[in-house]
Structure formats: structure tokens, C-alpha cells
């Protein structure tokens, strides 16, 4: 009978559990104010393990299979645009069918081999722009529009009250010539490649392709505007006044002729005299390229932003001092560059992780501009960006919270928490979340006190986080 006593014994009544559970551990992902379906996905450019990996295959069929399974979208129309510009440029070039066919076959091979595709496909707009620019000289004059001689000088006087280019170029000196020559005659042609190399090595993986596309499409659009709206530059006004211009007139090196004379070699006289677009004053690609390079570089390397700003001002001064562009040309080019940059940044530009020094230190890459939270948008975020953790909507399932909905204000006044008369702010109180509850994240200092928002000596002093509801 003793053996059956445990079975026959009456069962002990189970203890009733409260209808709410202890809140799970605090995770930053649960405090993300952006809904899950709207969050920007972390994308890798190669594999989950190494986002900085490069392709090394020469297998053309690998690219063909990728094209067969690719899901095409509206943004792929850019390749059709590039193809149209390339075919147009080859069409207006002098007849050389063998050379043109060889160019197309070589381009197709470079775009299909994975090892070269990763470089030539993103830079295709740049190669298209160069071909389009040099081929534009062969457009017949009867298809070209009227050349505007008085528009830019008039705009210069209306907007600035004087012709800034003529003022800056009125007095020249060999030292000033050298200072203007370096950014205009060297930096303009070398910096696109230098910036691309720096972004490739030290910025987030995927930054250089975005820069290359923005640069190429901006230049293609600028050359199209110069063909549709040809205007004479300042050197024409100084040499010919406001006399009507016609196609077939030679270009001019303007102030760069003094550089050739100084060094005793022909670096710019012949090339600028036979330029494809001698009347492509507006917009200025010297101004646009410098602004675009500065914007991308300051985004990836913000510590040097003042140097990049200085360089833009330097090349803008050099452009007007050498009598190649009006100030309105530079402003127009700068606006084009700003538009190209911000479109790229919002949608495609990888976010830099400033603690990473090279591309090979990245474990993941996030694309596009990070959406601002409520407190960042309206200026109530602290200097350390704790607003990133704010959740405005009270849709979480935690029923145990610390404090009350007005705890942020009450704590700053020294009042108690949870509506209790106790002076201890550690009382846990079960609450039922309302639809209009706002959740605020407060920081704790290393001494355990609530952070008052003041500047800390080190970021590490802000060690803990408390969620108030």
C-alpha cells in the first residue's frame, strides 16, 4: 500500500501565475522605430562572409546565366540609355566599320567576363561620356542650335552685379598662374581616378560603383546641355566682344597659354584650340566634378570635409582666373553635382562605418540614407544620438515597464516615479500599455545617475540604458 501512496495522494494545487510575464532582455533591434517591412536590408556585394571579395572568374557563361535569371527593374533602363549614347556616338564618327565593330566586341567581352565586369559595368557611364564628348565634334553644323553670346554675361551682371571672371583675370602673375594651373590643369583630369581608388580601398564596399555612375551620368547630361544650349565662355568675350559666334571657330587655352609659355611646352594650346566643344561654357564640368568629388569624399571621410570645401573654392577661383568660365557656369555645375550626389546617397550609397579603416574590415553593408527618427527630425535628439532608440508607437507587448509616461519630465523636476510617494525610482509596477504611450530611452552614467544630456568626456561613460514608458 505504501508503494501506491504517491499515486493515490491528492495532487497539490498548481500555483496560479500572473497574467503577465517578466519582460525579455532589452535588445536594440526591438527598439528600432522603423517598421520591419520598411527597414533597409543589409546587402552583401559578394558573400555573407566577405562583402569586400572581388570576382576572379573569366567565365563568360557565368554572366550569361546570371542575365537569364536576373529580375529586371525600372533602374535597368540606364543600360539602354548608355547603349543609345554609344550607338549615337559611333554613328556620327567617321566611317570605320571594322574599328567600330571591334570596339563593340571588346566592350561586350569586358562586360561579360566577371573579373572585368565588376569594374567596367559601373564605370560604363564614364566611358560613354568620354566617347560622346570627343565624337560631338562631328555633329554637322546644320543640326546644331544657335550659339548664345550675350546670355551668360547678362546673367553674370544681373546675379552678381559684375563680371567676376573678367575681374579675377584682369591682373595675372606667374605665381597665381601656377596656383590656378594645379587644380584646373592637373587636378581636374587626375582626381576622378584618384578619388575612385581612395573610395575603393578605404570606403565601404560598393561606394566606388555609385560614385562612378553618378559622375558618368552627370557628365553625359552636362555635355547634352552644352550641345543644346551652346554659350560662349569669357575668353571669347575678351577676344571678340559680343560679336556673333559661328561653328568652325577655334577654341582658346585662355590663361593656360601662359603655362605653356612658362614651361616652354605645348600642353594645352593645341588641345584647347581644337576642343570638341569650344562653346560648352554652361554648365562647367570643372565646377561640377569638383563638387561631386568633394561631396562623396566628405561623406566617407568627414574629418577632412574642410579640405574638400577648400579645394572646391580653389578650383572655382582658378576657373574664373584663367578666363574659362563665368561664375554662373560654376553654380550651374555645382547644382547638377549636388542633385546627382543626393539622389545617389538616398537610394544607393553604402553607409560608411567610420571605425573601419579599409574595405576589408566590413562585415556587412547597408545602403541608402538612414531615415531620421522623430527626435532627430525635430531637434530633440541628444548629442549622442539616443533618439535612434526611441519608439513613438506603443505597439510592443511588454507589460512591465519602469516609470510612467511623464517620467522624463518628472525626473528632471526631481519627482517620484510610477506615481508613488516613495522617493526610490526602482519600483516595478504592472501597467497596461495605451495606444498613445511614448517610450523614451534614457542613459545612465558610470555612477548610476540618469544622464542629464550634457557632454561627456568619453562615450564609454554612458554605459547603461533605461527604457521609460
Image: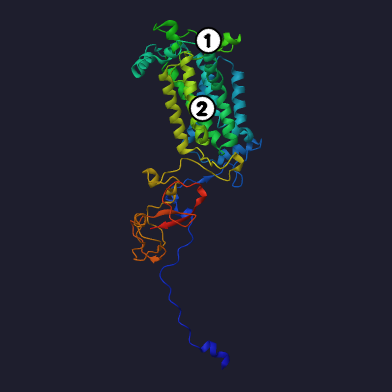
Please identify the quadrant where the C terminus is shown.
Answer: bottom left
Colour mapping: rainbow
Q: Quadrant of the N terminus?
A: bottom right
- Can residue 274 be seen from the camera position used here? no
The relative height of residue 339 versus residue 388 in the rendered view (above or below) is above
> In the image, 51: left or right of 160?
right
Q: Nearer the viewer, residue 456 or 286?
A: 456
Q: Nearer the viewer, residue 335 or 418?
A: 418
Vertically, is 366 above or below 185? below
Q: Quadrant of residue 65?
A: top right
Q: Nearer the viewer, mark 1 or mark 2?
A: 1
Q: In the rendered image, which residue does mark 2 sit on?
A: 216
Return the x and y of residue 46 as percentages of the image width and height.
59, 42
User: Would residue 423 be found to the left or right of residue 43 on screen?
Assistant: left
Q: Residue at x 38, y 66 (%)?
A: 429
In the rendered image, the vertical position of residue 240 relative to residue 101, given as above or below: above
First along the sequence among labels 1 and 2: 2
Q: Secondary structure at mark 2?
A: helix
Residue plotted at (43% across, 5% down): 240
Q: Which residue lies at the image location 44% right of the left edge and 25% below the top edge?
A: 334
**Which residue has dot 1 on it?**
273
Q: Are marks 1 and 2 in contact (CB under 8 Å)?
A: no
Amino acid at each position: 500500500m505504501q508503494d501506491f501512496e504517491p499515486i493515490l495522494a491528492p495532487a497539490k494545487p498548481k500555483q496560479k501565475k500572473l497574467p503577465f510575464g517578466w519582460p525579455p532582455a532589452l535588445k536594440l533591434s526591438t527598439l528600432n522605430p522603423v517598421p520591419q517591412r520598411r527597414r533597409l536590408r543589409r546587402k552583401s556585394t559578394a558573400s555573407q562572409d566577405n562583402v569586400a571579395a572581388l570576382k576572379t572568374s573569366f567565365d563568360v557563361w557565368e554572366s550569361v546565366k546570371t542575365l537569364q535569371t536576373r529580375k529586371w527593374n525600372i533602374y535597368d533602363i540606364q543600360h539602354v540609355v548608355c547603349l543609345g549614347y554609344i550607338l549615337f556616338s559611333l554613328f556620327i564618327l567617321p566611317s570605320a566599320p571594322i574599328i567600330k565593330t571591334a570596339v563593340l566586341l571588346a566592350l561586350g567581352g569586358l562586360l561579360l567576363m566577371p573579373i572585368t565586369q565588376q569594374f567596367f559595368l559601373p564605370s560604363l557611364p564614364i566611358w560613354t561620356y568620354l566617347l560622346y564628348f570627343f565624337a560631338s565634334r562631328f555633329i554637322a553644323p546644320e543640326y546644331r542650335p544657335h550659339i548664345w553670346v550675350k546670355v551668360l554675361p547678362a546673367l553674370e551682371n544681373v546675379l552678381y552685379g559684375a563680371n567676376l571672371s573678367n575681374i579675377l583675370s584682369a591682373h595675372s602673375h606667374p605665381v597665381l598662374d601656377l596656383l590656378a594651373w594645379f587644380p584646373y590643369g592637373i587636378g581636374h583630369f587626375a582626381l576622378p581616378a584618384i578619388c575612385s581608388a581612395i573610395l575603393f580601398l578605404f570606403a565601404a564596399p560598393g561606394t566606388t560603383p555609385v560614385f562612378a555612375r553618378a559622375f558618368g551620368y552627370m557628365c553625359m547630361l552636362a555635355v547634352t546641355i552644352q550641345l543644346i544650349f551652346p554659350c560662349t565662355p569669357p575668353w571669347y568675350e575678351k577676344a571678340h566682344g559680343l560679336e556673333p559666334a559661328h561653328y568652325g571657330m577655334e577654341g582658346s587655352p585662355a590663361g593656360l597659354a601662359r603655362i605653356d609659355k612658362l614651361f616652354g611646352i605645348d600642353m594645352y594650346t593645341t588641345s584647347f584650340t581644337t576642343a570638341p566643344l569650344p562653346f560648352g561654357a554652361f554648365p562647367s564640368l570643372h565646377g561640377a566634378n569638383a563638387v561631386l568629388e568633394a561631396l562623396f569624399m566628405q561623406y566617407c571621410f568627414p574629418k577632412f570635409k574642410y579640405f574638400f570645401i577648400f579645394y572646391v573654392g580653389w578650383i572655382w577661383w582658378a576657373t574664373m582666373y584663367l578666363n574659362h568660365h563665368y561664375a554662373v557656369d560654376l553654380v550651374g555645375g555645382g547644382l547638377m553635382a549636388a542633385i546627382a550626389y543626393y539622389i545617389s546617397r538616398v537610394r544607393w550609397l553604402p553607409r560608411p562605418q567610420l571605425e573601419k579603416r579599409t574595405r576589408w574590415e566590413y562585415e556587412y553593408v547597408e545602403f541608402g540614407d538612414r531615415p531620421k527618427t522623430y527626435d532627430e527630425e525635430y531637434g530633440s535628439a541628444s548629442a549622442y544620438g539616443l533618439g535612434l532608440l526611441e519608439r513613438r508607437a506603443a505597439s510592443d507587448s511588454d507589460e512591465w515597464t519602469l516609470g510612467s509616461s511623464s517620467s522624463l519630465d518628472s525626473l528632471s523636476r526631481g519627482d517620484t516615479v510610477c506615481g508613488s510617494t516613495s522617493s526610490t525610482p526602482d519600483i516595478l509596477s504592472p501597467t497596461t500599455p495605451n495606444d498613445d504611450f511614448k517610450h523614451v530611452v534614457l542613459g545612465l552614467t558610470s555612477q548610476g545617475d540618469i544622464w542629464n544630456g550634457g557632454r561627456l568626456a568619453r562615450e564609454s561613460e554612458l554605459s547603461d540604458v533605461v527604457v521609460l514608458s
